[in-house]
Image (cartoon, helix red, strand yellow):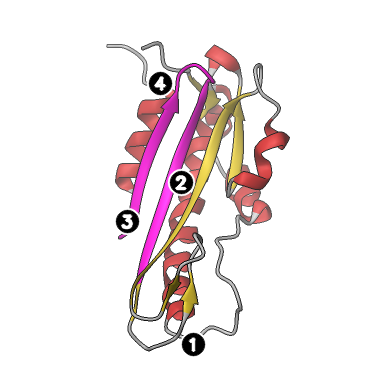
Amino acid sequence: MSQMNMLDAIGDKMDQLDFDGDLSLNWDKDAHVIELEITMTAESESGVEVEDQTGTTVDDGPVTYQDAILFYDETRLHGADYADDYLAIFGFNGKKGIDVATVNALFIYLQDLLDDGQSDLMDFVDGTSDDDTFALNFDEARYEAILAEQPDADNRFFLPYPKY
């Protein structure tokens, strides 16, 4: 039996999330990046006018929010160059891949983030939120606290980059 690679592990973790929105994985083999795309939709029925990410004004019907997490090869790319375009970025070490602790901590945190985010989006769309804009915010400190709770062995076990 072959070892699970990072693409399969991330896909399995995605499947385990309890999330009503859409999650998808995009793998760019040439660039050595994997994007985890998040799409949330909330129904606007209250007559509150909302401008979506594309600039379209919606006052009745579905409002869609999209964001993504980037996994990038640190041996090929400088992740900070892409940080503003993603909810979060995670570097991995070339063919060696990414450690299990990072993936596990991310998906533990991501479940909470998606739960809170979906609720916050519904509040925003129905006008009960005090915020002028909606966006998911990745709390690095919360993620790091979850990462610190992972078993030490998971920091030493790597999920390799796929060989397809």
- Return the disc, 1 or 2, that comes first in the chain's sequence: 2
Q: Secondary structure at mark 2?
A: helix
| Residue annotated with mark 4 | 5
Pair 1/2: label in front: 1
Check disc 1 and report the residue beneath it.
128
142 vs 64, left or right, is: right
Q: Quadrant of residue 122?
A: bottom left
Report crowding for label 4: few under 14, some 14 to 19, many 20 or more residues within 10 A (C-alpha): some
Pointer 4 or 2: first along the chain? 4
Which residue was labeled with disc 3? Answer: 18
Pick the quarter of the image with the N terminus. top left
Does 36 appear in magenta?
Answer: yes
Residue drawn at x 54%, y 32% as measured from the top left: 71
Whether residue 76 is situated above or below residue 70 in the rendered picture: above
Tell me, yes or no, whether the two marked residues, 4 and 1, touch with CB atoms within 8 Å: no
Viewer-side label of 3, 1: 1
- Give the mark toward the camera: 4 or 1: 1
